[in-house]
Amino acid sequence: MHAVFLDRLLQKDFQQKGYSLIPSLLDLAAIDRLLTLFKKFEDEYSGPFHTSHFSTNTEYKKQVHDLISDMVFPLVEPYLNDFVPLFGNFMIKYPDPGVAMDLHADWTYVDELQYRSLAVWIPLVDVDIENGCFGIIPGSQRVVNTIRGPLIRQSSRNHEPEWEKRYGKLIPMKAGDAILYDHALLHYSPPNKSDKVRPALNLSLAPASAQWLHYCQPEGTNEIDLYKVNNPDFYINYTHFQRPETGEIFAKKAPSEIEYIDDRMNKFWKTNLVNKIKTWL
């Protein structure tokens, strides 16, 4: 397995929990520069939650990706074992006490039997439970399926609030703090109950030596397509829920082949206990 972190202790911690925290990764000048770009495209934002990745405005997506990649990647690269940026986007949550980000794992970007990909999530304002901070289920990256993508369901959706309550951990952060998490880690975010917008950014990274992948179940179809991705422009041009216009398709699956994670998650406390015991031996 290709290591994520160069430091052995960081790698061991990441393997166990599925995430690592880096305080004050961005300074005030960097935050101000990113907030300036955020305000420039306010006309693009719609709904209580917006991510630039789902926009159809490729120029907007490219400007956001370029700035986030240029500013954030050089700061995290020294910690990582030969990673490259895939795409960067804004994650914007407007005040709405009724809208939370449901529990989910991010898309699959590499063969997770050989590699791990990760994301860097950074709030551009201070965050806590009141305005929609980041929430995770530590260790859940070992439970989820390795095939994930748009419209590919991972669970029955019947138990997710229970999993959040039983296993979830909310992480208050200061503006500029960073959480680096495995794309397979289950995460969520409570509603923004404040009276101000909560802007954050997310930068996805993958090992340079890995073949990048994209699984999707195009809207209106009953099959899962697997694409090879050879260029980060794939994500700039990709229209969410649709068949990609670029990339090489090389496999198909039926959704029925993807087992729901419900049973595994309902036994998650046992999985955690076994893994903790292994670390003690």
Image (spheres, rainbow, N blue to C red):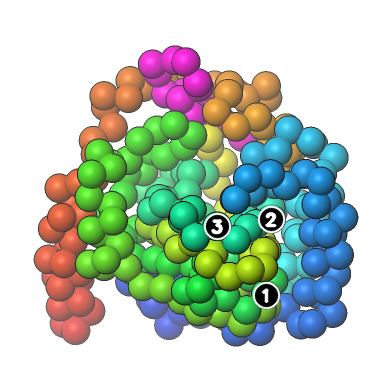
Query: From the image, which quarter does the N terminus lie in?
Result: bottom left
**Residue that label 2 marks:** 90
Q: Position of residue 61 (x, y in %)?
A: 77, 44
**Residue that label 1 marks:** 125
Q: Nearer the viewer, residue 143 or 207?
A: 143
The stretch in magenta equals 216-230
Q: Position of residue 125 (x, y in %)?
A: 67, 75
Separation of marks 1 and 2 at Cα, in angstroms: 13 Å
Q: Position of residue 136 (x, y in %)?
A: 39, 66
Q: Nearer the viewer, mark 2 or mark 3?
A: 3
Query: Callout 1: helix, strand or loop?
Result: loop
**Residue that label 3 marks:** 96
Residue sticking out furthest to the top: 221
Q: Is residue 229 magenta?
A: yes
Compared with 174, 55 (above or below) is above
Q: Is residue 250 visible?
A: no
Separation of marks 2 and 3 at Cα, in angstroms: 18 Å
Q: Amino acid at mark 1?
A: Val
Q: Residues within 10 Å of mark 1 (few under 14, many from 20)?
A: some
Which mark sits nearer the N-terminus, 3 or 1? 3
